Image (cartoon, grey):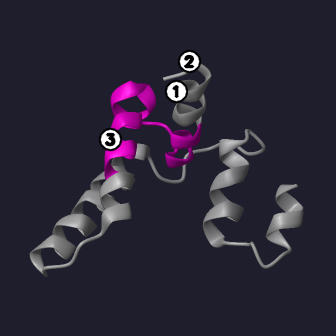
Amino acid sequence: MLALINESSGASWMLGHRMPRALGMESGITAQTHVLTKDVKLANLMAQERGLSLPMGEVAARQMQASCDHGWRDADDSSVFHWYRELFQKGN
């Protein structure tokens, strides 16, 4: 399915590079979760300083921080997918 999506108009760089690791098709760490969390928070701060609102950036920062707080800090940033899976399997 992933290969099909990546060959269609639904393709994206993020999907093609992060999802194989999230699905366990590839391994390795390309960006630790805490590093990308820091970057998203910095982008949000820069936007705020310029009077801009990034609602999805704020949501992303909260979710990524929660992923770090739940043990995925040093894992590849695609691990946010694993944190979501655990969260929803528990019914939270």
Tell me where residue 81 appears, x and y as whole percent: 58, 41
Q: Give yes or no for residue 76 being in the magenta stretch.
A: yes
Question: Which quadrant of the structure image shows residue 70?
Answer: top left
* Residue 91, magenta (yes or no): no
| Left or right of residue 54, residue 23 in this image | right
Which sits in the foreground, 32 or 70? 70
Residue at the extreme left of the image, as rendered: 49
Compared to residue 89, the image places residue 43 above or below, namely below
Label of residue 87 in the image: 1
Q: Which residue is drawn at 51% across and 41% down?
A: 80
Sequence-wise, which precedes: disc 1 or disc 3?
3
How packed is label 1: few (under 14 Cα within 10 Å), some, or many (20 or more)? few
Left or right, residue 56 beside residue 26 = left
Q: Could you say whether the residue bearing mark 3 is in a helix, strand or loop?
A: helix
Q: Is residue 73 visible?
A: no
State which tag comes first along the sequence, 2 or 3: 3
The amino acid type, in three-letter code, at marker 1 is Leu
In this rendering, position of residue 9 left or right of residue 35: right
Q: How crowded is mark 3: few (under 14 residues within 10 Å), some or many (20 or more)?
A: many
Task: Compute the Cα span from label 2 to label 3.
Answer: 19 Å
Residue 75 visible here: yes
Secondary element under disc 2, as helix, strand or loop, is: loop
User: Which numbered disc covers residue 90?
Assistant: 2
Count neighbours of disc 2 (C-alpha within 10 A) and say few if under 14, some if 14 to 19, many if 20 or more.
few
What are the residue bounds of the magenta stretch? 61-81
Give the residue pinned by disc 3: 65
Look at label 3 and name its amino acid. Answer: Gln
Which residue is at a point 63% across and 55% down the rendered structure image?
18
